[in-house]
Amino acid sequence: MTSINDPKPESFQLSQLMNDTRYRSYTFQFIALIVLFFLVGYLYLNLVENLRTAGLDISYEFLGEPAGYDINQRLVEYNSQSSHWRASVVGVLNTLLVAFVGCILATIFGVTAGVLRLSNNWIVAKLMAVYVEIFRNVPVLIWILIINAIFLIALPQPKAFKSRGGNPPEAEMLWDSFAFTGRGIYAPKPVFETGSWVVVAVFILSIIGVFAYRRYAKFALYNHGRDLPRGWPSIAILFVPAILAYFVMGSPIGLEYPQLKGFNFKGGIWARGSFVALTFALAIYTGAFIAENVRAGILAISKGQTEAAAALGIRPGRIMSLVILPQALRVIIPPMISNFLNLTKNSSLAIAVGYMDITGTLGGITLNQTGRAIEAILLLMAFYLAISLGISAIMNVYNNSIKLKER
Amino acid sequence: MSDQSIAFVRHETLPPSPPPASETGIVKWMRENLFSSVTNSILTLAALYTVYSILSGSMPWILGGIWQAPSLQACREILAGDSAGCFAVLTERWHQLIFGFKYPQEAYWRPTLAFVLLIVAVAPVLFANLPRRMLILTGLYPFIGFWLIWGGTIMAPLMGLVGFIVAYIVFQRLERSSFAMGVLGGLVAAIIVWTLGGYVSDAMSGFLALEQIPSRDMGGFMLNIILGTVCVSLSLPIGILLALGRQSNMPIIKIICVVFIEFIRGVPLITLLFVANVVLAYFLPPGTTFDLILRVIIMITMFSSAYIAEVIRGGLAALPRGQYEAGDSLGLDYAQSMRLIILPQALKISIPGIVNVAVGLFKDTTLVSVISMFDLVGMIRGPILASTEWNGVYWELFGFASLLFFIICYGISQYSQWLERQLATDHR
């Protein structure tokens, strides 16, 4: 008679915490947690002690106090009596403006350079390679300073546009409407008078009309086999009604040209030199990176795809738009978005050219005036972090939506 | 039969005629690559015009430049109205641009020697066909470099080195029982040696001592190179640890790593430099004085280690699952399978990405000029452009700075592409 005894339940030994893989990860995590706790506690105690000796405290009340400094470029109402909070809002808007314009310009530069670098024209391809390598390999801060210096030194001051004593002026405006001066770029501003809403409404309707027409053309092609022209009717639908409405309403939209008054230009749109320099430098620097992404994306599509499309009898232009680009975009867009993010973060270099973005207001003058370094920098980081994480979240949703659906 | 009817028969072969001129040599190349269509021809002409206008504008300015003059005023007098570069600022302020304006003149040989040694020390890491024995110098370099640049007695870096050696020996002894024990033992041993070494080097402070140079005296391009090399080499091990932590299946460690990486990657480097400049001192024990360069090194290292961690995580994720399972099935524990199987492969695939991060970081070291440190850009914007002699020499100075950065960054990125071709062992 044999009987199998159940093995005695193991008693738990302390050494198992280290040697048994079932428990070891708990030990490590526990140690990590303790270390983290002590580290944070240590830093916190130091902070409290240091603040006490310096007679400071953590408070955000300074945000409500009047700022007392001027900001030269403001998109919302602001004067030196406004609060520090208001100054920060102005800074945030200035940051977002640079980031927005910069991203659009960078996309234009990058896509153009990336596509042209693959061109079969040898000299154009080499020229674009030179552009990409030069801009990628020199720090963006140096580019910002160089382009700012172009504005400061190379471009004429507004007073150079004045003719003095019968002499022709030293500098001339482009088409009498654009002035490139050391203080920035002056351009005509559209002025909307009564009745202009009709023109705007007609134009918006034409845009909708273009989409409707293209849908109809697709429908006609797929269901009835009629290949309607798409190019010129779209342009006609887009512009003809708007131009007709413009003249019917008696030219309600005018242009206000910048005029030289005294030593400066008045009227029109004035893009500040520091803004233009910063935006342009960031855009052309980031454009070089985007060009590489675009090139890599197009090269990632195997040649077989092009050949297969050609074998089906598709025209070269349509091969690009129907076969290559939809696949290449999947490769191009994620790194492109992270480049946009880099541009936004690099826009904090505005402080080097005196453009008042959030780093210049909250992290610059407000910080120096109030001495609230910890609070100001915490808010500054929170702002950038919010943008980054927000865009990353959108990115993840997008990446999941374009992922190759595989069974 | 008449002899007129005899057909003409050629007895010798015709010599081959040359191909038409439009199908050979430079003409064919130009026809195919420059003028293949109307659009292409227009593009070519436009590109040629661009190149011509850039060159015709800049070449006389560069070639006619003045290299010897005491000030911009004198330079303009020599030029007498001509438009040309005044490169005299580079020769005149050369030492300031390279070493900063406070580093003692008679000690310039030290950073120069350190830079030459740096190249020798890095070479065996970059090129696998150099003799492996050169790696000994690479291991010793951090201590030699520190001694040369900062000065002081040689005992301090020597004790640092001894600490590492003792730690390694202890680690090897204890590793047989457990990896974690080995690391812990090594750490304790190193701390003991360093504490004792501190007394020793204090006691022998005159032994083989170079003149001590405080780090706030460093400046110029030297500062960029110091920050770049120190931060990249420090951030590599930290980045590896962070990447492993983010990939691990222990939730708490994973969360700590994710929060750290995403936080650092979400904020601009400038804000971290502000932290180093004004905030970090609040978090240190009262009475400690960290100099600014050390605080900046801490923040830049944190910054770049987060980016390197993401690159390495990409490498870890790209490895096929089978590699991890192979390690498990051989009975290796976590530390062994990581060190012997996973990391060698993962690091190999992430080398190009790491090099990219390193180049980006090296370019970003110029940002320290914003917190009023005098690196190359800080020197140009501060002491040189503000001086009465050279007020207004923008293009020459910024052109020089761009050129320096371009040469180094382009060189590194070319190296990384070469390495990528060398490492491409999959035959496609």
Image (cartoon, coloured by chain):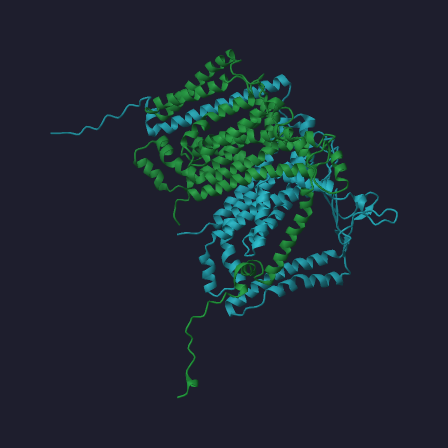
Chain colours: A cyan, B green
Q: Which of B85 and B299 lies nearest the eye of the viewer?
A: B85
| Residue B383 rendering spot, x and y as whole percentages | 69, 29
- Residue at far left of view: A1
The furthest residue to the bottom: B1
Q: Quadrant of residue A358?
A: top right
| B254 is higher (above) or lower (below) than B159 | below
Q: Residue at x 55, y 46 (%)?
A: A336
- Tag count: 0
In the displayed structure image, the side of residue B294 where residue A203 appears, left or right: right
Q: Position of residue B99 (x, y in %)?
A: 61, 28
When asked about the image quadrant of residue A270, the answer is top right
Horizontal side of residue A108 vs B205, given as left or right: right
In this view, the residue farthest toward the front is: B3
Q: Quadrant of the N terminus of chain A?
A: top left
Residue at point 56%, 43% (across, down): A339
Measured as percent of width and height from the top left, residue A280 is found at: 65, 44
Residue A141, visible in the rendered structure: no
Q: Is residue A12 above or below residue A402?
A: above
Is residue A108 visible to us here?
yes
Q: Taking B279 as reference, is B185 left or right?
A: left
Query: Residue at coordinates 46% horizontally, 58% vertically from top-left?
Result: A305
Residues B116 and B428: in front is B116
* Residue A215 point in image, percent of width and height: 56, 62
Residue ranking furthest to the right: A165
